[in-house]
Image (cartoon, coloured by chain):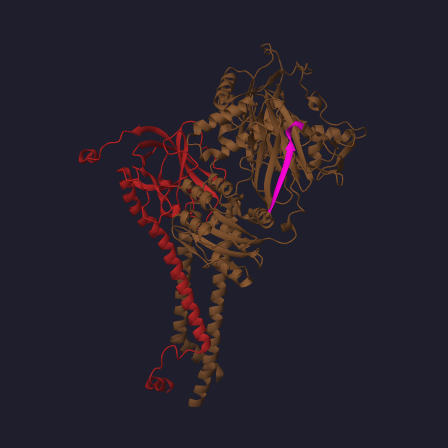
């Protein structure tokens, strides 16, 4: 009987039929959902920013290689492109920025300006986020070839050595060591959720410089 | 029935709502619990991730007093050689002090090693002498250009000769590499340096670094088994009772017994002495006459965690406010002069100064992260310190800029809060265009009110490329304003900021970490708030123009004296030294007759050291860095000083040891070369013998032996060339930046929240519809 009555009456608005407590509960649920959405959005925004900026940076770096003096990908950028690093075996590459201060790391791997330029005497250090640009660093095996193109057009070949894990302030990397070295660093453990003090470091040694080859179809097909 | 139903359903609707709420609350609690779980787990992860500190290992940056380091088996770490004895003699002659530190170390290992002796010194010290005794060799350092010295050292090292190389690493850190230290050999190192006595408010003080490097608790957690590569058998552990060895060095008393320190200060103040006291250490003070004292350290009270500090002052009313000293070296006269401006005379002292402060904060992308937080915190602190009669404004810049108030406003509480809220809301983004902000700060803030002090405080990491343009702007448009720079972050552009502050006649404050904000900003506030003696200049009247340092003269803050050194031609210069300045609005002027100067020692070295500082500071005006290096080298070589471009190198001064002779059998004593005084650290019995305390002495000796064994065990028994490489390696480690984004965490938490919302929502909907009906009927049944 009651059901009949309910059906015969016009249905009031869903919210209007809720008691005060129920509205509060519903509002809470909605808020939690919204917060979740925002967080997910923010997380993906960071990743998207990292990916999209690399596209822009690649363009800027190309221009820089062809003699454009300004290495800024967009006018208000607070950093410059410095080099491009690639790992041919796993087919990955990234444009490296100058200086790991502040937000530069959000856009690309950064060459620490306190260390010598890659290819110069000493140990050069390039660091990047483990969950964006250096996600592939764990796939770099000892013996892999690393190709580094500097903005002055010189191209260096490095051979990756052993990787190791160290605290950020006990890296054991000496910028003024004898020889030509390159150290790639990212955070460790790779699948951690929190930011931690440990770093994963791949040491690489210079094996030679590649003469700049004019980019023609034949050189590509080779 | 119908009514019953109605009532029942109403009841249940109420209880239903209550149940819904309970459910929601429970779910919320579960959610919070999950979060807490996540956080604590992460925290536990980070703490456990920190590796155990290496037992007995130190890093060069930990060193607080002179220490001899050997490379260890752990890359990047060192083991500290046992200090058998330390003797310090400080001679104070008026405003100058000369310190001689003699330390005896021991190589406890069974191999030939290269050690690095690291010693921190006060910033203004001029190191000029290095003497060493290794085994049976005596060597004395010669000043050479850095590169040449390095080559000499490397060659001697390769030839197996004993050699030493003393280099300046930073203005206040010196290292001395010692090559070819034989097994079990004792090393005696003696260095001498010159520095100026610090004066402030009529109080004179000296400081000697004594802090013993922190040692980490030597509790090996994993027992390592060394398998011999040829036989495959494990060799027995060389230290059988490794676990029992505790770190005895952290206990000051223990340290005093193992490493006896003797310290003597021969104090000749040059004026009738009043109170003489040591802040942290027990001392015996012997009064020789009115003007001089002899201060010795009490044997058993050497806290290892405090630097030695001695302060003294003149007896009431006899405090000198000016002094002039001279020294003749190489046909030239060197002058040292100090004058304390009359504090009471300045009117500004009685009434607080009115200040007009323009804060400029950099919120460009390079500041993102901790730098921005530090900058915001520092600025908020600075704004909160303003007084209502002060006026202020805040300018922020990245590649754009904005001025917070249209003009300088009075620092009333509401305005201060408004500005602080504005600062706290800033985020770091975009490029760095400093010039417009600087222009705005220097030019558009209206004229300075009468009697007010205009100050521009710049907070930045100085990541800019157009330094010269900025310097120009400061020099041209500064007017009466003072520019203070505050360097933020771990690696700010110190050169730019030091220089900018110098052109702006302000000071440079460096804030390296969050924990330093309060202390460093506090120092800055005292300078900002206390009136300064400004526009100080010195000139010679009737004397040939001399080379004055520092140049330009910095502003003075309350109680600080002007201390200047000068180089004059000729051995008997005549004429007057004139110092001009301004205390508030009042001009101030002092004249001193050069001929009446009393003689002092070491003034030439002090002048040279300051000259080098001035040259270093002028780096931006000299286009060619080689020219600068050459000039510094000339000054340093002429005065036998260690600097950035010159080093002390020493190679065997006595005939070499006969081949095959066992060192441990040719025990000391040895005859010291004439003029060498190794005083109290020479010879045996490093432990003070006190009658009736034999047990203690034995215990001390025993723990020393144990320590020696531990040290030897941890040392890298490697060829010296490899050791040298390791030393170089650990001297400057690269710190790696944070390389994980919050993205994954945020996505994960977001997804969790969404899942929870979905779950809760579904529950809710079900609750409203069929389940509600079921529960309702249940209730109805029970109700009946």
Magenta-colored span: B586-595
Task: Specify whether residue B205 is painted magenta.
Answer: no
Residue A163, x across and y down, in percent: 41, 36
Say how many tags the image has. Answer: 0
The quadrant where residue B681 appears: top right
Residue A184, x across and y down, in percent: 39, 38
**Left or right of A190 on screen, residue B172:** right
Q: Residue furthest top?
A: B658
Q: Residue furthest front?
A: B542
Which hue is chain B drawn in?
Answer: brown
The quadrant where residue B737 appears: top left
Q: Residue furthest right?
A: B692
Q: Main secondary structure of the magenta part?
A: strand
Q: In this picture, is B92 found above or below B51?
A: above
Residue name at image x 47 percent, y 51 percent: B360
Task: Name the residue nearer the viewer: B436 or A54.
Answer: B436
Residue B178, x across and y down, in percent: 56, 22
Residue B710 visible from this viewpoint? no
**Left or right of B202 on screen, residue A119:** left
**Left or right of A174 on screen, residue B320:** right
Q: In this picture, is B444 found above or below B771?
A: above
Residue B77 visible from this viewpoint? yes
Task: Name the residue nearer the viewer: B354 or B307.
Answer: B354
Residue B162, x across and y down, in percent: 56, 17
Task: Specify whether residue B591 is painted magenta.
Answer: yes
- Chain in red, by letter, is A
User: In the rendered view of the protein, which quadrant contains the N terminus of chain B?
Assistant: bottom left
């Amino acid at each position: 009987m009651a059901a009949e009555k309910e059906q015969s009456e016009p249905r009031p608005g869903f919210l209007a039929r809720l008691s005060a407590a129920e509205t509060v509960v519903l509002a809470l649920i909605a808020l939690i959902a919204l917060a979740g959405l925002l967080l997910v959005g923010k997380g993906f925004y960071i990743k998207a920013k990292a990916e999209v900026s690399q596209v822009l940076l690649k363009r800027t770096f190309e221009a820089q290689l062809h003699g454009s003096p300004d290495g800024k990908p967009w006018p208000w950028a607070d950093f410059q492109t410095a080099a491009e690093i690639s790992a041919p075996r796993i087919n990955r590459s990234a444009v490296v920025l100058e200086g790991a201060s502040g937000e530069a790391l959000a856009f690309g791997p950064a060459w620490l300006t306190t260390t010598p330029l890659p290819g110069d005497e000493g140990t050069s250090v390039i660091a990047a986020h483990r969950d964006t640009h250096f996600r592939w660093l764990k796939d770099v095996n000892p013996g892999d070839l690393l190709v580094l193109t500097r903005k002055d057009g010189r191209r260096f070949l490095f051979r990756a050595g052993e990787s190791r894990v160290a605290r950020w302030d006990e890296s054991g990397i000496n910028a003024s060591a004898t020889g030509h070295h390159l150290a790639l660093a990212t955070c460790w453990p790779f699948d951690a959720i929190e930011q931690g003090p440990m770093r994963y470091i791949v040491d690489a040694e210079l094996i030679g410089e590649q003469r700049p080859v004019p980019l023609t179809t034949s050189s590509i097909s080779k | 029935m119908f009514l019953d139903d109605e009532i029942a359903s109403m009841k249940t609707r109420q209880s239903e709502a209550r149940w819904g709420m309970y459910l929601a609350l429970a779910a919320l609690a579960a959610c919070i619990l999950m979060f807490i779980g996540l956080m604590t787990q992460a925290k536990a992860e980070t703490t456990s991730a920190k590796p155990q500190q290496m037992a007995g290992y130190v890093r060069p940056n930990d060193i607080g007093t002179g220490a001899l380091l050997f490379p260890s088996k752990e890359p990047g770490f060192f083991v500290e050689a046992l200090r058998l004895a330390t003797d310090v003699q400080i001679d104070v002659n008026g405003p100058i002090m000369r310190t001689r530190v003699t330390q005896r170390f021991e190589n406890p290992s069974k191999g030939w090693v290269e050690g690095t002796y690291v010693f921190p010194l006060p910033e203004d010290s001029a190191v000029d002498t290095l003497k060493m005794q290794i085994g049976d060799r005596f060597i004395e350092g010669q000043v050479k250009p850095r590169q040449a010295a390095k080559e000499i050292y490397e060659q001697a090292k390769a030839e197996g000769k004993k050699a030493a190389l003393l280099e300046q690493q930073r203005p206040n850190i010196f290292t001395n590499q010692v090559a070819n230290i034989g097994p079990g050999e004792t090393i005696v190192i003696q260095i001498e340096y010159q520095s100026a006595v610090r004066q402030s408010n009529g109080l004179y003080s000296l400081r000697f670094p004594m802090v013993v490097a922190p040692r980490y608790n030597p509790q090996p957690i994993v027992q390592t088994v060394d398998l011999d590569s040829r036989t495959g058998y494990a060799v027995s552990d060389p230290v059988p009772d490794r676990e029992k060895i505790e770190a005895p060095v952290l206990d000051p008393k223990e340290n005093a017994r193992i490493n006896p320190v003797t310290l003597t200060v021969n104090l000749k103040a040059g004026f009738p002495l009043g109170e003489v006291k040591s802040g942290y250490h027990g001392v015996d003070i012997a009064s020789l006459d009115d003007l001089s004292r002899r201060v010795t350290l009490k044997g058993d009270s050497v806290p290892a965690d405090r630097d030695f500090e001695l302060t003294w002052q003149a007896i009431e009313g006899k405090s000198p406010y000016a002094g002039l000293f001279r020294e003749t070296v190489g046909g030239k006269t060197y002058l040292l002069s100090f004058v304390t401006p009359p504090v009471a005379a300045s009117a500004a002292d009685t009434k607080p100064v009115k200040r007009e402060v323009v804060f400029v904060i950099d919120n460009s992308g390079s500041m993102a992260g901790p730098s921005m937080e530090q900058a915001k915190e520092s600025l908020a602190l600075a704004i909160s310190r303003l007084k209502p009669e002060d006026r202020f404004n805040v300018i922020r810049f990245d590649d754009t800029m904005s001025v917070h108030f249209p003009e300088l406003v009075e620092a009333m509480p509401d305005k201060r809060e408004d500005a602080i809220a504005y600062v706290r809301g800033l985020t770091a983004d975009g490029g760095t265009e400093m010039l417009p902000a600087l222009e705005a700060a220097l030019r558009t803030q209206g004229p300075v009110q009468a009697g007010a002090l205009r100050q521009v405080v710049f907070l930045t990491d100085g990541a800019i490329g157009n330094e010269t343009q900025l310097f120009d702007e400061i020099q041209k448009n500064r007017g009466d304003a003072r520019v203070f720079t505050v360097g933020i972050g771990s690696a700010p552009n110190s050169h730019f900021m030091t220089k900018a502050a110098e052109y702006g006649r302000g000071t440079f404050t460096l804030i390296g970490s969050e924990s330093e904000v309060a202390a460093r900003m506090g120092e800055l506030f005292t300078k900002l708030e206390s009136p300064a003696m400004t526009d100080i200049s010195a000139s010679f009247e009737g004397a040939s123009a001399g080379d004055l340092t520092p140049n330009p003269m910095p502003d003075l803050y309350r109680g600080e004296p002007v201390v200047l050194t000068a180089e004059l031609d000729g051995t008997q210069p005549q004429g007057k030294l004139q110092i001009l300045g301004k205390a508030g609005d009042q001009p101030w002027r002092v004249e001193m007759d050069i001929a009446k100067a009393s003689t002092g020692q070491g003034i030439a070295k002090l002048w040279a050291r300051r000259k080098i500082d001035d040259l270093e500071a002028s780096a931006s005006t000299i286009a060619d860095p080689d020219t600068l290096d050459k000039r510094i080298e000339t000054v340093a070589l002429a005065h036998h000083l260690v600097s950035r471009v010159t080093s002390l190198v020493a190679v065997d001064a006595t005939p070499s040891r006969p081949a095959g002779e066992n060192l441990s059998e040719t025990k000391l004593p040895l005859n010291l070369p004439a003029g060498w005084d190794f005083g109290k650290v020479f010879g045996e019995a490093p432990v003070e013998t006190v009658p009736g305390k034999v047990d203690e002495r034995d215990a001390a000796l025993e723990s020393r032996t144990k320590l020696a064994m531990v040290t030897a065990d941890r040392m890298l028994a490697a060829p010296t060339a490899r050791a040298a490489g390791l030393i170089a390696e650990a001297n400057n480690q690269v710190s790696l930046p944070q390389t994980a984004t919050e993205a994954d965490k945020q996505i994960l938490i977001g997804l969790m929240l969404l899942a929870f919302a979905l779950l809760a929502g579904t529950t809710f909907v079900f609750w409203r519809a069929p389940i509600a009906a079921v529960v309702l009927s249940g209730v109805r049944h029970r109700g009946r």
